[in-house]
Every structure is written in structure tokens, then in C-alpha cells.
């Protein structure tokens, strides 16, 4: 079911919320998670975002995340498996009071090109205010075109994000994933 796209001004509290979630994930996963990163628009100061914390976790092998799955589910995370992206494991978490989406957790095996893609994109926008502002404009354009469909909104900005991330990781090709 499509979710509406609601962009809000950047909230400095998002960084602390991400850190709290990261600590919780590390506690639930013990030695499973090698690193957990705050990514996505909530990790880029100054730009509007959907108020959903995006996290990227690295594991030695994807099978390892299954060992932490029950602990994460007990904390309110919902397991989605690959959820359309080969090589990823995906969890979501909703706010228990409002039922609205609060966080996404994308899990990849260390060395997966998606890790470099996401982190390079985030770091480039953090370092280049003009690029971050251009992204904010692209997000606003896509939100206006697809206000009631978060999947269409994401697809709308895909070419822009792929181009910027490809440049950020050294001019490589955009990250192409098989979608089931």
C-alpha cells in the first residue's frame, strides 16, 4: 500500500534519534552488526526529509542477521527479508503511539557496493551545501508529482540520486540492483 510523502524541515533531533536506534541495534545484535550508519535525508543537515530515520547496517554475511532477527522484532522492528532488493535485508519500525513509520534498517554484507553508494551520497551532500540544496529541490519536485505514493516519489528522484552517488564513489556507474 502506498504511503503519502510528507517532507518536513530538517530536525536536529534526528541525529540523536539515530544514535539511540544504533545503540539499540548493536545491543540487540551483539556481535552481528559490524557497523550501523545513519544515512538518507535525515542524516543531511539543512534539507527537508520524510521524518523517517534511515539506517544502514553492515554484517559479515547476510545469514548473520537472521541470528539477530528475533531480538530486533522484539524491539518493534518488522522483518521484510530482501523486500525487492537482492543482497539486502530490510526492517521497518513504526512509532508505537501513532503507527506512523519511524525508521528503516537496511542490512548489507560488508563489501556490498550499496554501502559505499549510500555513504558516499550522504557524505557528498553533507560536504556540498549547493548539492544538498539541489537535492532538496529534486525532492520537492518529486513530492509534488507523487504526494500520495512514496514508491513513485522514490523512483522519481532515482536518476538524480544515482548520478550524484556515482560521481561521489569515483565516477562509477549508478548502482543497479535486480528488483524482484
Image: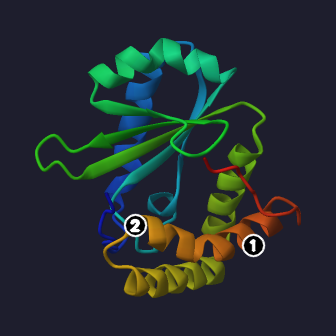
Q: Is residue 93 above or below residue 130?
A: above
Q: Quadrant of residue 59?
A: top right
| Residue 33 marker | none
Report the side of 138 relative to 176 (left or right).
left
Q: Is residue 162 above or below residue 115?
A: below
Q: Earlier in the sequence, mark 2 or mark 1?
A: 2
Residue located beneath label 1 in the image: 163
Residue at coordinates 40% horizontally, 51% vertically from top-left? 53
Which of 93/85 is in front? Answer: 85
Q: Are marks 2 and 1 in contact (CB under 8 Å)?
A: no
Q: Is residue 89 above or below residue 130?
A: above
Report the side of 83 relative to 144 (left or right).
right
Rendering coords of residue 97 (x, y %): 11, 44
Which of 162/51 is in front? Answer: 162
Rendering coords of residue 57 (x, y %): 57, 34
Report the side of 144 relative to 65 (left or right).
left
Report the side of 16 relative to 168 (left or right).
left
Q: Is residue 88 above or below residue 166?
A: above
In this rendering, the label closer to the viewer, 2 or 1:
2
Residue at coordinates 21% horizontally, 45% vertically from top-left? 95
Rendering coords of residue 143 (x, y %): 40, 80
Question: Residue placed farthest to the right in the image?
Answer: 171
Rendering coords of residue 67 (x, y %): 50, 12
Residue at coordinates 71% horizontally, 51% vertically from top-left? 177
Residue at coordinates 34% horizontally, 33% vertically from top-left? 78
> Quarter of the image containing the N terminus?
bottom left
Q: How many marks?
A: 2
Residue located beneath label 2 in the image: 150
Q: What's the colour scheme?
A: rainbow
Which of 67/25 is in front? Answer: 67
Q: Quadrant of residue 42?
A: bottom left
Q: CA distance from mark 2 to mark 1?
A: 20 Å
Amino acid at each position: 500500500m502506498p504511503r503519502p510523502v510528507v517532507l518536513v524541515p530538517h530536525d536536529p533531533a534526528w541525529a540523536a534519534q539515530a544514535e539511540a536506534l544504533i545503540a539499540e541495534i548493536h545491543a540487540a545484535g551483539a556481535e552481528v552488526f559490524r557497523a550501523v550508519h545513519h544515512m538518507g535525508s535525515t542524516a543531511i543537515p539543512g534539507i527537508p526529509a520524510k521524518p523517517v530515520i534511515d539506517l544502514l547496517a553492515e554484517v559479515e554475511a547476510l545469514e548473520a542477521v537472521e541470528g539477530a532477527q528475533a531480538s530486533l522484532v522484539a524491539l518493534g522492528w518488522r522483518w521484510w527479508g530482501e523486500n525487492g532488493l537482492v543482497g539486502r535485508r530490510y526492517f521497518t519500525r513504526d512509532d508505537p503511539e501513532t503507527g506512523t513509520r519511524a525508521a528503516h534498517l537496511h542490512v548489507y554484507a560488508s563489501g556490498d557496493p550499496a554501502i559505499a553508494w549510500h555513504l558516499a551520497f550522504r557524505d557528498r551532500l553533507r560536504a556540498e551545501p549547493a548539492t544538498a540544496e539541489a537535492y532538496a529541490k529534486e525532492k520537492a519536485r518529486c513530492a509534488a508529482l507523487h504526494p500520495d505514493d512514496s514508491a513513485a516519489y522514490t523512483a522519481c528522484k532515482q536518476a538524480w540520486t544515482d548520478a550524484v552517488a556515482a560521481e561521489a564513489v569515483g565516477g562509477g556507474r549508478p548502482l543497479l540492483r535486480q528488483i524482484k
